[in-house]
Amino acid sequence: MIEIENVSKWYGDFRVLAECSTSVAKGDVVVVCGPSGSGKSTLLKCVNGLEPFQEGTITVDGVSVGDKGTNLPKLRSRIGMVFQNFELFPHMTALQNICLSQMKVLGRGPDEAEERSMKLLERVGITEHAHKHPAQLSGGQQQRVAIARALAMDPIAMMFDEPTSALDPEMISEVLDVMVDLAKEGMTMIVVTHEMGFARKVAHRVVFMDEGRIVEEAQTEAFFTTARHERTQMFLSKILEH
Amino acid sequence: MAMKYNWDWSIILCRSPEEEPTAAVEPGTLAPDATSAVGGGAGQFFDTGASCAQPYFDWIVSGVSWTIIVACAAWVITFSLGSIIGIARTVDQPVVRAVATAYVEFFRNIPLLLQMFLWFFVVPELLPEDAGRWVKRELPLPEYWTAIVCLGMYHASRTAEQVRAGIESIPRGQTQAGLAMGLTQFQVYRHVLLPVSYRIIIPPLTSDFMGIFKNSSVALTIGVMELTAQSRQIAEYTFNIFEIFTVATLIYMVVTLIVVTVMRFVEAKVRIPGTIAMGAD
Ligand SMILES: Nc1ncnc2c1ncn2[C@@H]1O[C@H](COP(=O)(O)OP(=O)(O)OP(=O)(O)O)[C@@H](O)[C@H]1O
Ligand SMILES: [Mg+2]
């Protein structure tokens, strides 16, 4: 469903992505990991056209992201994205956050949008906070609202960029639980995370990036047991220590 | 404080016609002591009301009205133009940004007084013949229109900077989140960036409005009879310079205070729940 072929990207002289290739089929759950600055976030942002790239092609459900003629807002509306810092809109309640794009992008009426939003809030377990503003919610609650907001667009795939790394430890599991449920329901997911427990539990494949390259890509079990590259092994030993 | 000056508030408050000519001709002889003048004068004003002939109180009322009209009308230009320019400075298109930056630099760096003269004396000459003639001959109250446009456009350059700063203070992630859910750039501004940044910049926008209000006095140089101009005129007629400029000062302060209070209220009203207001300055 998402094909990434030989994608390279530069910031000035600095190469952030170097000939990245991978593909994600419908229903796949792919975990992307790697050291800080290795280009994980950049790769995700290239997939939905938030960042332009200079070489290679990315296609989402048959639509080429890099093409000039591509309707990017439409393409983006079909891929849900969840950010490290939640990025809820502070002046709107949780409910309004979830309704906004349904109404403005999908053209749903207020009643339909609200009904759908309440169902999603129920699904992520925070109906009682529907009318609170983001600043009145804990990090874990905000991130669950953000997930509900992304799901409200009925996306064909979801991308998560370190969804739990800004959270206090006791809130991580409440967010991961929601993600595990999603994965089990068959959602196509690309998840940048260092939560290896989550990867083991639901990921079909793990991609390891370093210095803009996809260094290693393997089935989950194989990745943890028989990682081939020295870099991957070093990274894994560091991360699995705690 | 050993002041030789005889304070005489009656020139403003006392509206009985028979006192007026002497006051204008020979102020020194007429000064009753200040305390009784304030009380008595106020009483007389309310007693005699519209029947009076003394013009000074009316002059002040007219001055205050023009100050407020000019300032408010200029603010409408400032706010709309300043918002457009400020937003233009944050968009992706380099040409749009450059034009907006040029505007800000141009209007911010020329003294307001000079701009007032340019608008009044030079711009009508530069207009196409018909338009120029219309401005010079037929436009009613040309100095007032000029003052409004000049103040509005001068202060728009400042408001534009506030708007730009407000938008730029919002983390990039907010824009990305908006775009990622399929909103267009326009929708992101409309529903995310602007509602948040206007809330943030209420205090500096309030200062901007006060700047317009105070700078409206510069319009007296092209003949706008606003509060400062009227005060000066009364001072020239009566020589009661202390009283009249004290009154003018107080009026400016009171209006400023009202504006600050109203804006505090507005700020509290639109405050995002769970966050702390910054307070108008
Ligand atoms: N706008 C930018 N301009 C220049 N360099 C950038 C920009 N954004 C990111 N970079 C650089 O690109 C590299 C990759 O950044 P990216 O955010 O994709 O890394 P990451 O793998 O997500 O890291 P982290 O785990 O810290 O989030 C980094 O070295 C970063 O400094
Ligand atoms: Mg990142």
Image (spheres, helix red, strand yellow):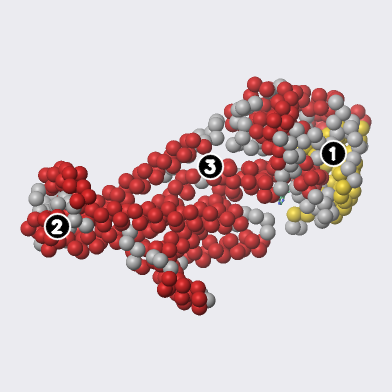
Can residue A124 be seen here? no
User: What residue would you read off at disc 1?
Assistant: A208
User: What residue would you read off at disc 3?
Assistant: B199
Q: Horizontal placement of B5 versus B122: left or right? A: left
* Residue A145 picture location, percent across and down: 69, 30
For ligand 1, tell me if the residue under mark 3 lies within 8 Å.
Answer: no
Image height of B169 relative to A132, above or below = below
Amino acid type at mark 1? Phe
Q: What's the residue at 62%, 31% (across, down)?
A: A93
Nearer the camera: disc 2 or disc 3: 2
Nearer the camera: disc 2 or disc 1: 2
Image height of A108 relative to B207, above or below = above
Query: Regarding mark 2 in the picture, which secondary structure is present there?
Result: helix
Q: Chain of mark 1?
A: A
Q: Earlier in the sequence, mark 2 or mark 3?
A: 2
Say which mark, if any, is on residue B20. Answer: 2
Total numbered labels: 3
Q: Nearer the viewer, residue B6 or B76?
A: B76
Q: What's the residue at 69%, 49% (across, down)?
A: B185
Q: What's the residue at 46%, 62% (across, down)?
A: B149
Q: Quadrant of the C terminus of chain B?
A: top left
Distance between the alpha carbons at the discs numbered 2 and 3: 51 Å
Q: What's the residue at 71%, 38% (across, down)?
A: A103
Query: Regarding mark 1 in the picture, which secondary structure is present there?
Result: strand
**Callout 3: 10 Å neighbours few (<14), some, many (20+)?**
many
Q: Chain of mark 2?
A: B
* Residue B126 picture location, percent across and down: 50, 76
Q: Chain of mark 3?
A: B
